Image (cartoon, rainbow, N blue to C red):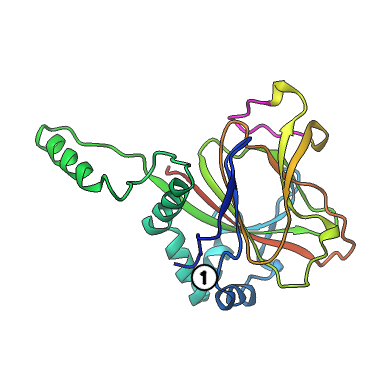
Amino acid sequence: MFFLYDHFQFQYEPFPIGLGKPLMAENVYKEFLDNYPSLDIFKSIPNKIGNKYSLSERFNSKEYKDFIRSSPLWLEFHRWIKSDEFVNGIMDMLREHHIDLGYGLPPLPRKQYMMKFMRNLKRGKILRSVKLASRFEFSMLPAAGGHVLPHTDAPSKIVTMIVSMLREGEWNPAFGGGTDVNWPKSTDLSFNRLNRKADFEDMDVLHTYQFTPNQGVLFVKTFNSWHSVRPMTGIDPELMRKTLTINIELAD
């Protein structure tokens, strides 16, 4: 297991969102920083939700797969993120914080679940459970104007974790780069299950999770999980807000 879940603290309104810091042991985190991919294999995806560079299963997928295969560290991490162990670990951690999404099997009822499964199997009824999938994306936003418009995430997403990838002293907090928890100024934007985008002026900022080293910001997708990254104010065109974005979502 790469992540430390003991430090997570949650707020529950307007949607469940929490901060875990430190997210990794310092030596493990440093190894990830040392092996983060270079910008030249990312794909620029402007005009979608903001101004960002992505390297993922969906954007520059060949380069993404080649990079993962070339790095023992990232290959091991990729296998872990794709595993039931990771998904169940997140669901168990959320339940410990009174956020039960109904996925995975809690430790105590597991025996009862199996007994019920066997009874239904004998009766010709097969229990069907919702299958979840998980993936991660390398993401960069330019410190000079990079941003992500207010949105609530696609309906297929269940949980998102944003993992900061930066060294101590590398980032000036005055540039911004934090993850904003938003609340719409107009009630007609309150329900956004299907993830239409909004403008920054449509939102009030309730709270900002600052962009700092070795942290994970984790939230549950809901009908009102409005979040964003406001345009950053750095001037160095080469300085990037580097993250891993991890999603748990409904399997295809």
Q: Residue at x 77, y 55 (%)?
A: 177
Residue linked to disc 1: 74
SS for callout 1: helix
The answer to whether residue 37 is left or right of residue 97 is right
The answer to whether residue 77 is left or right of residue 238 is left
Residue toward you, 245 or 16? 16
Q: Quadrant of residue 22?
A: bottom right
Figure check: 237 above or below 26: above
Q: Residue at x 71, y 21 (%)?
A: 188
Figure check: 117 above or below 142: above
Crowd band around label 1 with a 10 angstrom C-alpha radius: few (<14), some (14–19), many (20+): some
Q: Residue at x 71, y 22 (%)?
A: 187
Q: Quadrant of residue 128?
A: top left
Q: Picture coordinates of residue 204 (x, y %)?
A: 78, 35
State the predominant SS element of the stretch in magenta: loop
Residue toward you, 70 or 30? 30
Q: Picture coordinates of residue 13 (x, y %)?
A: 62, 36
Figure check: 98 above or below 54: above
Where is the N terminus found, in terms of image quarters?
bottom left
Q: What are the residue bounds of the magenta stretch?
A: 190-198
The answer to whether residue 207 is left or right of residue 68 is right
Confirm whether the magenta stretch covers residue 197. yes
Q: Amino acid at mark 1?
A: Trp
